[in-house]
Amino acid sequence: MMSTLSAGVGREEALKLLKEYNSEAFHVRHALTVGAVMGWFAQDLGYGEDAEFWSLVGLMHDVDFEKWPEEHCVKAVELLTQAGFTPEFVHAVTSHGWGMTGAAAQPELEMEKVLFACDELTGLIGAAALMRPSGSVSDMELKSLKKKFKDRKFAAGCSRDTIIQGAEQLGWELDTLLDKTLTAMREKEAEIEADVAANT
């Protein structure tokens, strides 16, 4: 089945744009992580033909955050449109800021709801991995992640309320979202690390 979604711009051009507006390694790593996780979710949820689109949405979701944090998901509309991304792509990217920024776009497609749900969660999982002796998600279990999730002082910048709201929008139990995102990060870890090494 052919993809029905078009980003309008390929990954190489998208990466170039991302790095033009994001110089901090932390932000580039987050973008690459969310991109890989979104690609995993596309396959897992039966949208394999759109996996590249999902992945690009994840990659570019914070394109404006480093330079324009006060205009997050607003400035992105201008940057992405000028770069040639399609309106459907721009909507998908900006919808993850629904209710948090001036962005009016509400997550509608399952893809947009997944991005909304897993964006903050990837940050929480990444922070938890750094605390482990292995420094990796490869040996992290769901019960360990749940303990970190409940401790709101840990990685306090990762909004638990947004993650919970994201699971609700998807109609999933919170444990399902936590487990799937952890699995995605575990299975994509080598790919993410290679991408980070090549782009930071």
Image (cartoon, helix red, strand yellow):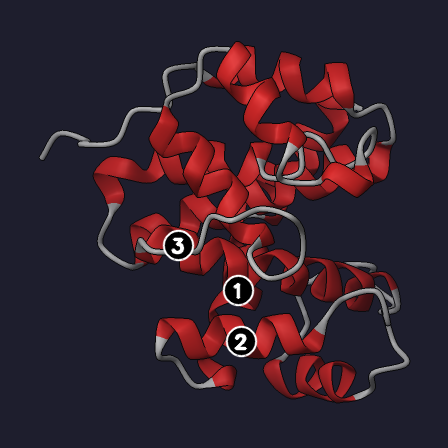
Q: Which mark is residue 165?
A: 2
On screen, residue 133 versus residue 38, left or right, reads right
Q: Secondary structure at mark 3?
A: helix
Q: Are marks 2 and 3 in contact (CB under 8 Å)?
A: no
Q: Is residue 186 visible?
A: no
Q: Which mark is residue 1?
A: none
Q: Which mark is residue 117?
A: 1
Q: Which residue is mark 3?
A: 41
User: Nearer the N terminus, badge 1 or badge 2?
Assistant: 1
Residue kind at label 1, given as amino acid type: Ala
Q: What is the spatial separation of the Cα atoms under label 2 and label 3, in whole angstroms?
A: 18 Å
| Residue 83 rendering spot, x and y as whole percentages | 53, 11
Q: Nearer the viewer, residue 21 or 141?
A: 21
Residue kind at label 3, given as amino acid type: Phe
Q: Mark 3 packing: few (<14 Cα in 10 Å), some, or many (20+)?
A: many
- Quarter of the image where the C terminus is located: top right
